[in-house]
Amino acid sequence: MSTTVGFDTHEIFRRLKQRGFTEEQAHELVEAMKDAQNELATKSDIRELEHRLKIWFGGLMAGAVVLIAALHKLI
């Protein structure tokens, strides 16, 4: 499950304006940053995926061993 890491949108907006962005440009950039943030994986997301992949790979390996044993009996 993803955890949102917040940031101060008002501060970012203010800094962009201070550096010469128009109000519309600053607003659009902050909105784009908020949208992109929803696509980021947290460390917790990565750990969960790693755990799930280990389980999946373990099952795959167990299946391969059973298949090899079954094929060995046929030969």
Image (spheres, rainbow, N blue to C red):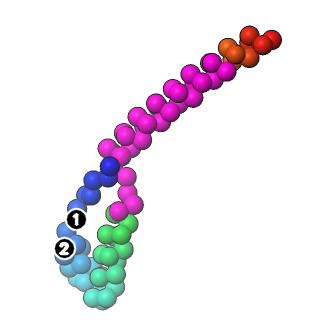
Of the pair 14 and 33, the residue shown nearer to us: 33
Name the disc covering residue 24, or none. none
Q: Residue furthest right?
A: 75
Q: Residues within 10 Å of mark 2 (few under 14, many from 20)?
A: few
Q: Secondary structure at mark 1?
A: loop
Residue beneath the point at 53% across and 27% down? 59
Q: Which residues are magenta?
A: 38-67
Asked whether residue 61 appears in the rendered view, the answer is yes
Q: Whole-percent x and y of residue 51? A: 40, 34
At label 1, counting other C-alpha atoms closer than 10 Å, the crowd grade (few under 14, some 14-19, many 20 or more) is: few
Element type at marker 2?
helix
Q: In this figure, which residue is indicated by the disc labeled 1?
A: 7
> In which quadrant will I find the C terminus?
top right
- Which amino acid, mark 1? Phe
Asked if disc 2 and disc 1 are in contact, CB closer than 8 Å, the reply is yes
**Left or right: where does residue 8 sit relative to residue 73?**
left
Q: Is residue 56 magenta?
A: yes
Give the vertical position of 33 relative to 6 (above or below).
Answer: below
Residue identifier under label 2? 11
Quarter of the image for residue 14 reads: bottom left
Q: From the viewer's perspective, is residue 48 above or below residue 42?
A: above
Foreground tag (2 vs 1): 1
Query: Residue 15, how many percent across, how many down?
Result: 23, 77
Left or right: 41, with 4 as reference point: right
Give left or right: position of 39 versus 73. Answer: left
Does residue 31 appear to the left or right of 11 in the view shown? right
Predominant secondary structure in magenta?
helix
Whether residue 19 appears in this view of the structure is no
Of 65 and 26, which appears nearest the observer?
A: 65
